[in-house]
Image (cartoon, rainbow, N blue to C red):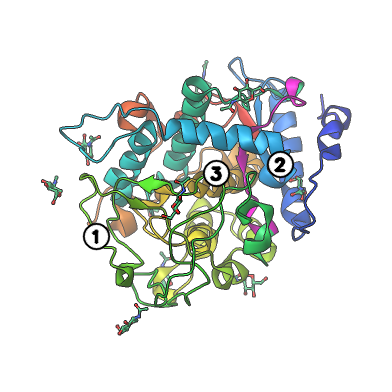
Amino acid sequence: MRFSSVVWAPLFVLSTVAAYTPASTANTDQLAADGLSNLATWAADGNLNGSCTLENAAVRREWGNLTNTERQNYTNAVLCLMALPAKTDATLVPGAKTRYDDFLYQHINQTLTIHQTANFLSWHRWFVYTYEQALRNECGYTGYQPVSLVSQPCAMPYLTTPSTAADPLDSPIFDGGDYSMSGNGVYEAHNCTEALPTDLNCIPAGQGGGCIYSGPFKNSTVHLGPVDATLAESGIVDNNGTSYNPRCLKRDVSSWVSTRWSTEENSTTLLTENSDIASFQDTMQGNFTLGEYGVHGAGHFTIGGDPGGDIYTSPGDPMFWLHHGQIDRTWWIWQNQDIANRQNAISGTITMFNSPASRNGTLEDMLYLGVNADGIAIKDVMSTVEGPLCYIYM
Ligand SMILES: *[C@@H]1O[C@H](CO)[C@@H](O)[C@H](O)[C@H]1NC(C)=O
Ligand SMILES: *[C@@H]1O[C@H](CO)[C@@H](O)[C@H](O)[C@H]1NC(C)=O
Ligand SMILES: *[C@@H]1O[C@H](CO)[C@@H](O)[C@H](O)[C@H]1NC(C)=O
Ligand SMILES: *[C@@H]1O[C@H](CO)[C@@H](O)[C@H](O)[C@H]1NC(C)=O
Ligand SMILES: *[C@@H]1O[C@H](CO)[C@@H](O)[C@H](O)[C@H]1NC(C)=O
Ligand SMILES: *[C@@H]1O[C@H](CO)[C@@H](O)[C@H](O)[C@H]1NC(C)=O
Ligand SMILES: *[C@@H]1O[C@H](CO)[C@@H](O)[C@H](O)[C@H]1NC(C)=O
Ligand SMILES: *[C@@H]1O[C@H](CO)[C@@H](O)[C@H](O)[C@H]1NC(C)=O
Ligand SMILES: *[C@@H]1O[C@H](CO)[C@@H](O)[C@H](O)[C@H]1NC(C)=O
Ligand SMILES: *[C@@H]1O[C@H](CO)[C@@H](O)[C@H](O)[C@H]1NC(C)=O
Ligand SMILES: [Cu+2]
């Protein structure tokens, strides 16, 4: 059975009331649609071995396509997670105060073995999925719905970063209203952001840099990190990542970054010009030697600030999850172009930039998230519809 267009048609009548015109993401969306069609053929050929089907898979939808109510349902659930008590052992990590911190801490603790490594894409896929489960199971987030119930509130959203790349600050996601992900930080004088260890491409100071006083996450307190701060001149000092270091959430939204490395052109080039997993994941993560951010780094430094600009502590800004939803979607689109050859493709070692030198990662390697989930083998998350995962992107 081919994928029936009738089933999906209602999705495209959803619209947003905002006047902001997002940039076209037509080329990437076409690749996504082609990939979904391939996935339907793959499923029809009997490759889905479990209970997940394309009909009962949860649908992750684009932020711009959510209603205001759906957006608030999501941000309310995130605020809930930020208010629930931590499960992490306080004697090991005294700074982890909330369930949100349980997730943040795992990223801090594992940063050097989950970036520029063989497990970069799979670890972050499992991380976002586990967070989505916590929102759903512990915080009443109802967005996790199968296709057959797609008129219900949305699934875990993602942001098609290229759609807002030309002008992120004017987009509804950063406008600071009740239905946004909160706005920019207030202006606070700061120097350019030394985002790469190579000191290349110091990001010019934007209009923010200070605390966030608008939208759902106004006056949020970050408890952990930063471990490698990027607003050091604002008096933010590095921390070992375990102690309690309460401070306001800061952003410095940067169109300078997004217009250079996070555009629709950058997304389609990444997807169409990298047929092996090594070049795909390296291009996505950027080349620090050349001062290239790639769409992954660019999404982070479009948010910037503290902790958004810190590779260790970046999940402390709730925008992290929408950006990584898009990173995961981009991998999903890439895999779906040639499922037989790409679904289980893996490359790289188990240490960041292979430093110190280490063995190659394998599909049998485990992914760990501490108190948040049981360990799982990489091979079990290579597909979003085989094994325990069951979601697709629309
Ligand atoms: C809704 O999603 C579709 C498919 O990804 C995308 O083409 C469209 O731009 C989105 N609409 C908005 C308002 O972002
Ligand atoms: C999300 O919406 C559903 C349905 O209206 C509601 O039952 C649930 O409490 C909401 N959750 C949050 C976190 O707002
Ligand atoms: C920027 O850096 C210069 C040189 O290190 C320093 O003198 C200045 O105070 C900094 N400006 C701000 C706003 O931090
Ligand atoms: C947020 O912080 C600002 C500045 O400190 C303060 O004026 C405001 O009352 C705070 N708002 C809330 C809701 O705590
Ligand atoms: C982290 O820093 C805090 C405060 O300086 C210190 O008490 C703690 O022992 C440090 N923890 C580790 C694991 O280094
Ligand atoms: C990213 O896109 C921008 C604008 O479309 C373009 O100028 C730039 O060369 C692209 N960068 C890469 C690395 O492809
Ligand atoms: C970055 O680019 C340099 C120069 O072209 C190249 O030697 C290096 O292998 C690249 N590094 C990565 C991680 O792609
Ligand atoms: C590790 O992977 C690289 C690239 O795929 C390959 O050239 C190399 O032989 C592998 N090393 C081992 C020890 O298998
Ligand atoms: C932090 O990571 C190390 C491995 O690098 C692990 O042994 C330890 O259990 C982790 N700490 C927590 C609290 O998860
Ligand atoms: C289905 O296949 C996936 C991928 O090979 C595997 O990880 C999973 O365990 C299988 N599930 C079942 C129920 O056999
Ligand atoms: Cu990360």
Q: Position of residue 46 (x, y in %)?
A: 68, 20
Q: Specify whether 306 is left or right of 45.
A: left
Tell me which segment is drawn in magenta.
Answer: 149-163
Q: Is residue 21 above or below residue 194?
A: above
Q: Is mark 2 within 8 Å of ligand 1?
A: no
Residue that mark 1 sits on: 238
Q: Is residue 133 above or below residue 281?
A: above
How far apart are the two marked residues, 2 and 1, measured between alpha carbons?
43 Å
Q: Nearer the viewer, mark 2 or mark 1?
A: 1
User: Is residue 30 at least partly visible in the picture?
Assistant: yes
Residue that mark 3 sits on: 216
Residue that extends furthest to the right in the rendered view of this protein: 6
Cβ–Cβ under 8 Å for marks 2 and 1: no
Residue that mark 2 sits on: 35
Q: Amino acid at mark 1?
A: Asp
How many numbered callouts? Answer: 3
Q: Specify whether 279 is left or right of 363.
A: right
Q: Which residue lies at the image location 80% right of the left edge and 56% below the top edge?
A: 19
User: Is residue 263 at least partly visible in the picture?
Assistant: no
| Label 1: element kind | loop
Q: Amino acid at mark 2?
A: Gly
Q: Residues within 10 Å of mark 1 (few under 14, many from 20)?
A: some
Q: Is residue 146 above or below residue 251?
A: above
Q: Position of residue 114 (x, y in %)?
A: 36, 47
152 is within the stretch colored magenta: yes
Q: Position of residue 333 (x, y in %)?
A: 65, 45
The answer to which of marks 1 and 3 sits earlier in the sequence is 3
Q: Nearer the viewer, mark 1 or mark 3?
A: 3
Mark number for residue 81?
none
